[in-house]
Amino acid sequence: MTDGQEALAGPSAARRATLLAYGCTYSMIIGVSSVMPLLPFLAKTFEVSLTHAGLVISAFTLPGIFFTPVGGILADRYSRKAVLVPSLILFCLAGAGCAAAPDFPSLIALRFLQGVGASSFGTLNNTILADTFRGNDLSRAIGWNITLLSVCTALFPLVGGLLGDINPRLTFLLPLTSLPILLPALRSSLARPERGAAASHPVAGMFRAVAEPKIRLLLLLTLLTFTMLYGPIITCLPVLGAHEFGQSAGYIGLLVTASSAGAALVAPFTGRLSQRFPLRSLILFAQIFYVAALLLIPEMPTFWLLLVPIFFYGLGQGFNIPNLQADLAKSAPKELRASVMAANGMLLRLGQTITPLLFTALIDARGVQSGFHTGVALSCSLFVLAWFFLPVKKEPEAVSKKTQEAIKTK
């Protein structure tokens, strides 16, 4: 490794930290992706409507809005390990408890508890990597993390569905596969943040760090990116597939997998790309794929031809998301890194909750094509923000003096 790019820990500690970070990503995906195919079967098992069965997903994601920032603040105030270990235990035990839930209210309560445990995973994965690596090695590690996320997102609906065909309750035992992560978590010290004014006043410090212009811009770019995902792709694409082409949920799921495949293809090269190009260039390049995909999707004459623009969209995600996440982790002050990543996670949860509602209302009012055209507008907004506000050349791997002074000031 070159100077300024090496791991900040020894090889053994770096491997253990990487395993824990990727374990957080793995666990986070299990909680939603494996359960999504079960909704019709759960409705039948517990004799509730399909709408009520959807609460199984909402009960898991809702706690993230409130508990993600709490987990980030605690991770900065005490340690990453102090948050990770109890979160893993709660996630695994509450998740397995769902398999034995005697009635639907009990299932929803256990899913809520499982969601509380999972709320810190999306914060800790990139935070642990940023504590362990720096420079291009951090970009590479986050790129592989996005690859894992993409593969798991594509794989676990199939695994959950196959288990659900045997017995829907079996799928809820999948979180037990995260239990082995506890062993390296207990053996690892992880990073204890530097003590200082921000560590003594973590809430105030988090708001000061988030107010730093660079971090605020990266948070906004990330929010717009995931709005494009949960709006045009997650919400509008299934409607297009079902209403325009009369396809089943299984075939539509395969279509979304093509997006994950595109992202997984590019993400492993994040380290090399970030070494050669500034974030601005990568974000601008990603918008070419986004706009092309979103303009082509409503014009495709057959269902299977949609695979082409969806794959293009995934390529855009591969250039965009890992580089954004890596730059955000690099830009956050070390003693407030988990808090900044938690603020990012909270925004994503809000977008995940609100965006489908807004886009379904848009579809009802103006048709499904309007959802994809709105996605083009969002992509153009990303292009403008990156063009005017991100630096043309690569910045040094140091936190700005303005940020350091801000977090030390009460």
Image: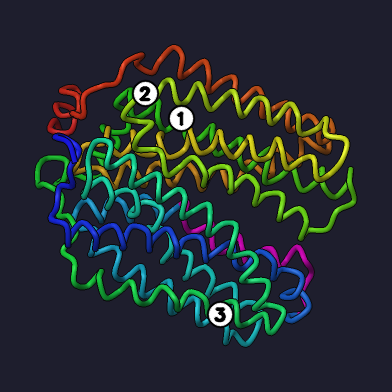
First in sequence: mark 3 or mark 1? Answer: 3
Q: Mark 1 points at which residue?
A: 220
Question: What whole-number distance in Å separates the C-alpha atoms at marks 3 and 2?
Answer: 46 Å
Q: Residue pushed farthest front?
A: 1
Picture quadrant where residue 397 is located: top left
In magenta, the rendered stretch is 47-65
Q: How many marks?
A: 3
Question: What whole-number distance in Å separates the C-alpha atoms at marks 3 and 1?
Answer: 36 Å
Q: Which residue occupies 36% across, 45% down?
A: 142
The amino acid sitting under disc 1 is Leu
Residue 145: % across, % down: 40, 51
- Secondary element under disc 2, as helix, strand or loop, is loop
Q: In this view, does 235 lie to the left or right of 269?
A: right
Residue 392: % across, % down: 36, 14
Residue 138: % across, % down: 28, 42
Give the main secondary structure of the magenta stretch: helix
The amino acid sitting under disc 3 is Cys
Question: What whole-number distance in Å separates the C-alpha atoms at marks 2 and 1?
Answer: 21 Å
Does the segment drawn in magenta span residue 296? no
Mark 2, Cα crowd under 10 Å, few <14 / some 14-19 / many 20+, is few
Q: Which residue occupies 40% across, 44% down?
A: 143
First in sequence: mark 2 or mark 1? Answer: 1
- Secondary element under disc 1, as helix, strand or loop, is helix
Residue 113: % across, % down: 47, 70
First in sequence: mark 3 or mark 2? Answer: 3
Mark 1, Cα crowd under 10 Å, few <14 / some 14-19 / many 20+, is some
Q: Name the residue under label 3.
A: 98
Residue 277 - label: 2
Query: Nearer the observer, disc 3 or disc 2?
Result: 2
- Secondary element under disc 3, as helix, strand or loop, is helix
